[in-house]
Image (cartoon, grey):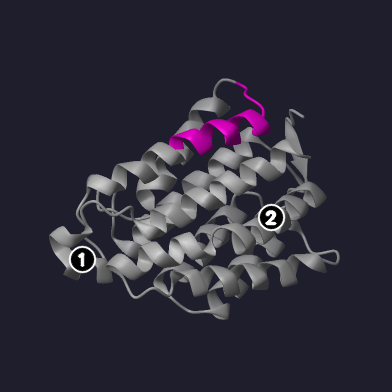
Amino acid sequence: MERKTLTRDDVIGVIIKASQAMRENHVKQVRDLDAEIGDGDLGITLQKGFTAVEDVLQNPGDAPLSELLKDAGMEFSEANPSTFSSFFATAFRKAAVKIKEKEEIDVSDLSAMFQAAVQGIMKLGKAAVGDKTLLDTLVPAAESIEWDAGRDVSITGALSNADGAAKKGMESTIDMVSKMGRARSFGERTRGVQDPGATAVYFIIHELSEAVSNL
């Protein structure tokens, strides 16, 4: 079903479903990739982090949507502190600022949230597209949503298009050499391996898109 807007309860439900899908379907693949060019703990981060997100959102009370998003990001980060979880918390915190006082969001709001998440992560991580990081997935997705916001595309359609853009971005990391984090020490050995952080972000966007399309 095409949705032009998402209510507070819609957003909560979508994130819960996406979190469950992340834990059930994608932990092993991300863990295995991370073991090739990192320390292999990204799978644990996803497992613990999304469990914490579900715990926060299962009992939202009357909290505003923006506060719930900030809390979800914080709990994800505290569940298993890591570089990725810090980026996740930053993304949610920055995105939440863009919908303060709102209990319903449209595609323009979604675009603002993604753009804020990108800027927050870039500032924190001092990375850019091409460095073989999660930004190689997140930036194309954000650009796709921004484009669709200018064409009055539904949130359902915008997330579906972002899914495709994110997938291409993720796959582009296969031929890159890591320039950031622990993976940088592996040098040329990282070429030919899909970046685990970029892969995790793709799966998140994909599961968000799937959850929205099933509303």
Residue 187 falls left or right of residue 125: left
Q: Residues within 10 Å of mark 2 (few under 14, many from 20)?
A: many
Residue 58 falls left or right of residue 177: right
Residue at image mark 1: 184
In-front residue for pair 10/168 = 168
Residue at image mark 2: 15
Q: Classify the position of the C terminus by image quarter.
A: top right
Q: Is residue 84 magenta?
A: no
Q: Is residue 162 magenta?
A: yes
Question: In the current view of this chain or complex, which residue is farthest to the top?
Answer: 151
Q: Please tell me whether mark 1 sits on a helix, a strand or a loop.
A: helix
Quarter holding residue 12 = bottom right
Q: Please tell me whether mark 2 sits on a helix, a strand or a loop.
A: helix
In-front residue for pair 102/39 = 39
Q: Position of residue 184 (x, y in %)?
A: 20, 66
Q: Position of residue 36 (x, y in %)?
A: 30, 66
Secondary structure mostly taken by the magenta-highlighted segment of the chain: helix
Question: In the current view of this chain or complex, which residue is farthest to the right?
Answer: 61
In-front residue for pair 191/147 = 191
Which residue is depicted at the point 79% across and 64% down? 63
In this rendering, is residue 84 above or below 152? below
Quarter holding residue 112 = top right
Label drawn at residue 168: none
Tell me if residue 129 can be seen: no
Amino acid at the residue labelled 1 = Arg
Tell me if residue 49 can be seen: yes
Which residue is depicted at the point 35% across and 59% down? 123
> Magenta part of the protein: which range?
152-165
- Count of numbered tags: 2
Amino acid at the residue labelled 2 = Ile
Q: Classify the position of the N terminus by image quarter.
A: top right
